[in-house]
């Protein structure tokens, strides 16, 4: 253990350690630094994926790889270089670009992993969630909470690509994964403008008296027109010196569960940010990991030691306790999701906001 250990003592120690290994023991004194670092030491690293590279590869997959039973989804997962060989963007968040050609269907199934879709561009796909047909359009956030049956059908003449977020790595670590195939036939071929969930739940501040609280939001779709209006209102109020923005030039909304006011999904935070052109955000770091996607605009993201020039569709990862700040070249909208609700539920959440640079 120390420099002063004699040869005889070293021999006894070696014997002891060999016996530890044999019976399945590891002494704390050789491990304490790894077990209890002074602050998080994520294996995941800050990383950027460019939409301009992802989309053509999704198209090629669309030409070459059928979608159907077994594979279930034509989804290409972001693999963090710090987590080599794993289809994980971060240790808790699965993130993919999914592609569905005209008149294709991705079959019904359900799983204990929670999921959402965020649409960068395009339309024509309806996702049926427990038999409720939900249109997917540009700027919309669509939810597929844990254990809801879901299938996707493209009724249009154009292919569609979107972003998928799931808590797959978290659920895997927790050994809490369950999966079930659904029927092979479509649950519904309907293509309504408004889903049943929206007809029941999408009225600001008004909830149906008949419905109980739920851990995940019952509102299956958060429409771009509402998100856009909420962000615009914050920036307009800023012009009147009224409260609303996160910091000067930086508006933000969180997608929430209308039954609880908490995050729309139990395990994942989903947000949209709008930066006025020229805005530089204060550096922030939080415990837990996040993925950002540019919805519109051009900006520079400082993430830890890295600097990313980002444009529409680009995706980047912010590992735990890694500082992030953004500088908007043009007005920029960003979708962000993270695992923060998990840390909050466990009493492990921490955030620190630095000075503007
Ligand atoms: C899934 O069900 C979807 O429904 C996307 O679109 C990605 C990755 C692994 C397992 C199930 C979807 C998935 C997934």
Image: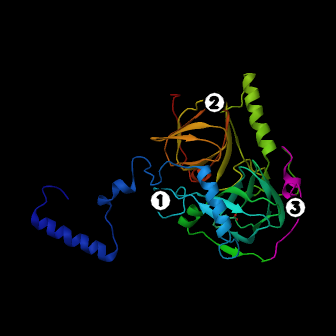
Where's ligand 1: which quadrant?
bottom right
CB under 8 Å between discs 3 and 1? no
Dot 1 lies on which element?
Answer: loop
* Residue 267 image offset from top left, x and y in percent: 63, 56
Lower sequence index among marks 3 and 2 = 3
Residue ID for mark 2: 247
* Residue 44 image offset from top left, x and y in percent: 48, 53
Residue 138 against residue 285 in the figure, above or below = below
Q: From mark 1 to mark 2, how far is it between C-alphas?
A: 34 Å
Lower sequence index among marks 1 and 2 = 1
Crowding at label 1, few (<14), some or many (≥20) Cα neighbours within 10 Å? Answer: some
Q: From mark 3 to mark 1, how far is it between C-alphas?
A: 40 Å
Residue 240 against residue 212 in the figure, above or below = above
* Residue 277 image offset from top left, x and y in percent: 65, 29
Q: Name the residue: 14% across, 55% down.
A: 3
Mark number, residue 83: 1
Picture mark count? 3
């Amino acid at each position: 253990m120390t420099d002063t250990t004699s040869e005889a003592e070293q021999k006894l120690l070696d014997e002891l350690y060999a016996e530890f290994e044999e019976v399945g023991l590891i002494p704390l004194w050789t491990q304490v630094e790894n077990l209890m670092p002074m602050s998080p030491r994520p294996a995941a690293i800050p990383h950027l994926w460019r939409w301009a590279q992802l989309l053509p590869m999704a198209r090629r997959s669309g030409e070459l790889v059928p979608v159907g039973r077994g594979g279930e989804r034509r989804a290409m997962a972001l693999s963090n270089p710090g987590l080599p060989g794993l289809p994980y963007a971060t240790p808790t968040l699965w993130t993919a670009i999914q592609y569905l050609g005209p008149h294709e269907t991705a079959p019904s199934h359900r799983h204990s992993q929670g999921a959402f879709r965020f649409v960068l561009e395009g339309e024509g796909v309806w996702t049926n969630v427990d038999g409720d047909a939900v249109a997917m359009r540009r700027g919309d956030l669509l939810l597929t909470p844990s254990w809801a049956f879901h299938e996707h059908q493209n009724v249009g003449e154009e292919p569609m690509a979107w972003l998928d977020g799931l808590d797959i790595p978290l659920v895997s670590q927790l050994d809490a994964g369950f999966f079930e195939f659904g029927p092979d036939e479509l649950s519904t071929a309907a293509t309504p403008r408004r889903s049943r969930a929206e007809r029941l739940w999408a009225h600001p501040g008004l909830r149906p008296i008949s419905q109980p609280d739920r851990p995940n939001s019952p509102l299956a779709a958060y429409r771009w027109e509402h998100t856009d209006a909420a962000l615009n209102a914050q920036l307009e109020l800023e012009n009147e010196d009224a409260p609303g923005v996160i910091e000067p030039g930086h508006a933000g909304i969180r997608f929430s569960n209308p039954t609880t006011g908490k995050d729309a999904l139990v395990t994942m935070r989903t947000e949209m940010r709008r930066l006025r052109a020229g805005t530089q955000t204060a550096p922030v770091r939080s415990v837990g990991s996040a993925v950002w996607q540019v919805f519109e605009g051009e900006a520079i993201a400082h993430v830890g030691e890295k600097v990313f020039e980002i444009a529409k569709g680009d995706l980047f990862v912010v590992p735990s306790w890694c500082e992030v700040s953004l500088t908007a070249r043009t007005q920029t909208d960003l979708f962000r999701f993270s695992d923060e609700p998990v840390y909050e539920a466990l009493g492990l959440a921490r955030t620190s906001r630095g000075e503007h640079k």
